[in-house]
Image (spheres, rainbow, N blue to C red):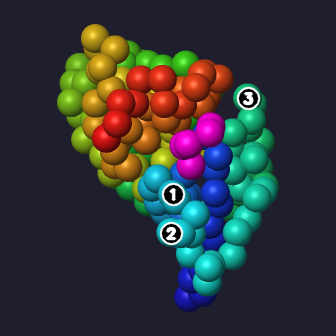
Amino acid sequence: MSTETLCEILELGSEGTLLVEFFLENGKIKRIGLKEAFEKTWPEEKRFSPFLLRALTERHPDLSGLLFEISGTSFQKRVWEEVRKIPPGLTKTYGEVAKNIRISSPRAIGQALKQNPLPIIIPCHRVIGKNGSLTGFSAGINIKQMLLNFEKGLDVHEDCGNE
């Protein structure tokens, strides 16, 4: 089995920068890691791939050039497929996602999204609480807010606070 890590630095504004790590096995993306990045934390030993995030941040992203493999239960895959339908700049609540796949539990949606191995490809940051609150995100609420603001074309630190 061949493993590899590709990295992308995604500039989200004057101060907001994410390090996006793509963990590949046999040429397929298996997992994506997100964290706030500062220049001194960029991993020098890893390759950078500008293609990957350019494709993912377009208004109508063409993912046909990306090879990824999604591992999860059939329920998780149903949830993740529904979440992939949410366009950049828009959000849906956990309850709306639940209704769309015909289940009654928004909490079950949250649990499925908690196991999402491919944030950005499966844009779970676009799923919010019923009152508009930002709840749950594997990379942290601050990064969720930064991604949503970036997609909406806002200043990325408008609502982030100083965490």
Assign the magenta stretch its main secondary structure. loop
Q: For the residue marked with disc 2, what is the amino acid?
A: Thr
- Residue at 69 percent across and 39 percent down: it is 57
Q: Which residue is mark 3?
A: 59
> Which label's residue is closer to the chain start, 2 or 3?
2
> Which residue position holds label 1?
37
- Quarter of the figure that contains the N terminus: bottom right
In this view, the residue in front, 149 or 108, is: 149
Near-viewer residue (35 or 128):
35
Kind of element beneath mark 1:
loop
The residue indicated by pointer 2 is 41
* C-alpha distance separating marks 1 and 3: 24 Å
Residue extending furthest toward the bottom: 1
**Disc 2 versus disc 3: nearer the observer:** 2
Q: Quadrant of residue 4?
A: bottom right
Q: Confirm whether the magenta stretch covers residue 14.
A: yes
The span shown in magenta is: 13-17
